[in-house]
Image (spheres, grey):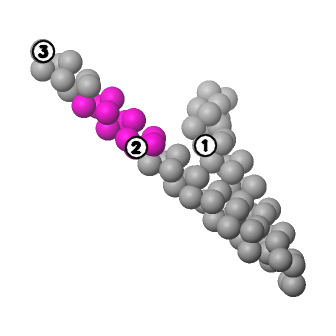
């Protein structure tokens, strides 16, 4: 149960954004001649971009924390 909770806390937001982006993409797919089609496509791509930014921030924070720990050990 503890492992599931850890995965949920780490990837729950990413999964929710991915489901939202997929839903919006499906709506865009079914809007054949609507002027809103490209707006929905852009929103879906923005959701995927948000996931990329989340992973980039996570990697950045891990690098900063690792660098601070190394500086703390050197002192």
- State which quarter of the image contains the N terminus: top right
Residue 3 in view of the camera: no
Q: Which residue is mark 1?
A: 11
Magenta range: 57-67
Which residue sits at x=66%, y=41%? Answer: 12
Q: CA distance from mark 2 to mark 3?
A: 25 Å
Q: Residue at x 65, y 57 (%)?
A: 47
Q: Which mark is residue 59?
A: 2
Q: In the image, 73: left or right of 36?
A: left
Q: Residue furthest bottom?
A: 33
Give the number of the mark in front: 1 or 2: 2
Nearer the observer, 42 or 54: 42
Image x and y of residue 44, in percent: 69, 64
Q: Secondary structure at mark 1?
A: helix
Which numbered marker is on residue 32?
A: none
Assign a secondary structure to mark 2: helix
Q: Is residue 11 left or right of residue 35?
A: left
Tag 3 residue: 75
Query: Whole-Å distance between the Cαs marked 1 and 3?
Result: 35 Å
Earlier in the chain: of badge 1 and badge 3, it is: 1
Q: Are marks 1 and 3 in contact (CB under 8 Å)?
A: no
């Amino acid at each position: 149960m503890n492992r599931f909770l850890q995965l949920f806390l780490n990837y729950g937001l990413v999964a929710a954004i991915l489901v939202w982006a997929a839903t919006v993409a499906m709506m865009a797919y079914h809007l054949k001649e609507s002027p809103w089609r490209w707006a929905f496509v852009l929103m879906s791509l923005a959701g995927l971009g948000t996931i990329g930014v989340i992973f980039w921030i996570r990697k950045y924070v891990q690098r900063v924390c690792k660098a601070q720990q190394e500086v703390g050990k050197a002192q």
